[in-house]
Structures are given as C-alpha cells and as structure tokens.
Amino acid sequence: MISAHTRNPTTLCLLLLILLVATCITALLGGCASGRQASGLAYDDSRYVPMSHQYLDTLREVARNPIVIENLKQSNRSNKMTQEQILEADEAWRAAGTEQTKEMKQVLNNEAAEYLDSLHQQHPEFAELFLMDQKGCVTAENVLTTDYWQGDEEKWSKVFNDKNGNYYVSDIAFDESTRLYLHHYSMPIMDQQNQLIGVIAIGIKVR
C-alpha cells in the first residue's frame, strides 16, 4: 500500500532518481572489480597496474629465445657452487663497489646480456632485464643488479617454486640498483624438453 506521503509526484520522482543513481554506482563498482580480476592485476595499496599484453608478449619472446635458453642451460651445467659459496659470491658482489667481480664481468659480457641490452634499447621503459638460473644466480643482465643471488627474492622464488608456468608481477617498490620505482615482471623459462631451467625478470619504470 502506497502511503499518502509517497503519492506526491515530486517525492516519487526523487525516490526513483535516488534508486537509479544507486543502481548505476553498484553496476560501475561491480564492473571495475570484475575487470581487475580478469586482467590479472598486481596491487599496491589502493593502486593497481595491469599486466599489459605487450609486456607478456615480450616476456614470452625472451623466454623462447635460443640465446637465452642456451645461456641458462650452460649456467645450470657449470654452476657447481654450494649454497655457502653462492652466498659468499653474493656478499663479494654487494661489497665490490666500482671494482667488478668475476661474476659481474661474466653476466654483463655474454651473448644473452647483449640480447637483453638490445631489448632495453628498444623499450626504454625497461629499466633492467636479467636472467636467473636454477639456483637463483644471475646469469645475464643489461645493468648490474644489487645482488648476485636472487633466490631469496619473490621475482625468482614465486616463479621457480611454482612449477606451473605462472608469471609474477611485483608491487611497486624502490629498486636499489636502478634507483627507480619499478614493477618487476617475471616468467619461467623452459628448455626444449619443457623442463624449467630459469627465470626472466624485467623491471619496468612506474610512470
């Protein structure tokens, strides 16, 4: 039963307008939520950045490149260091300052590093690109990372330990090696037998 109060045309129009606005707001919020979920978005507090198809395509291109695959296969064959030795090399890396260690020279001066640097030249928004082997050690990069061993960082562990071929997108964070705020995008690299041999990470500048 409609009360006498709601029989007033002005009141009825106002109620209908409020109902229409509320319905539109609900629909918009629902659309935004479903869009974020479908796009595979990484969150940083109230902000979010979509995993662009362009970046995914670039990661897949790198992951399939024969130079990259061979670089990681060689590293996995030759890297006989124990975890203790890796940590010692990592400490020497971080303490090196301007004088490059043997590992620094190796990862900056190989065919895969040249390939990664060419990608950096094509995509200036890529602040850093680097490969990591099965132990989490850097094997090639366009600029020196702060650490040699990346095994304790999510850009390696979230991908390598996943075993399902999933990619990873970090939150926005300040990167010590580039002195920039970056998102890191990581993807697994498989060999010709579809065995996981390493990870590619790309640090993308936040615009």
Image (cartoon, rainbow, N blue to C red):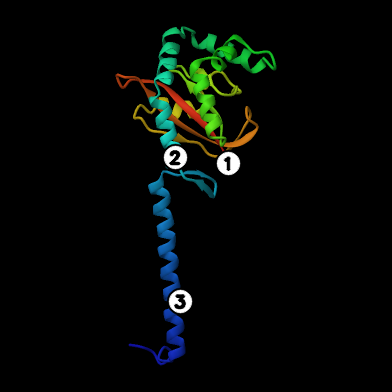
- Where does the image place residue 127, in percent across and percent down from the top left? 58, 32
Residue linked to disc 2: 54
Please give left or right for residue 182 compared with residue 53 in the image.
right
Earlier-in-chain disc, 2 versus 3: 3
Instruction: Give the amino acid at mark 3.
Output: Ile
Q: Residue at x 29, y 19 (%)?
A: 193
Residue linked to disc 3: 18
Q: Nearer the viewer, residue 44 or 175?
A: 175
Instruction: Give the amino acid at mark 1.
Output: Val
Mark 2 neighbour density, 10 Å: few (under 14) some (14–19) many (20 or more): few
**Mark 2 secondary-structure assignment:** helix
Q: Is residue 174 above or below residue 198?
A: below
Determine which of the numbered discs, if any, sits on residue 123 in the image. none
Q: Residue at x 42, y 86 (%)?
A: 12
- CA–CA distance between discs 3 and 1? 39 Å
Q: Is residue 124 above or below residue 101?
A: below
Residue 161 can be seen, yes or no: no
The answer to which quarter of the image holds residue 191 is top left
Q: Residue at x 40, y 46 (%)?
A: 39
**Mark 3 secondary-structure assignment:** helix
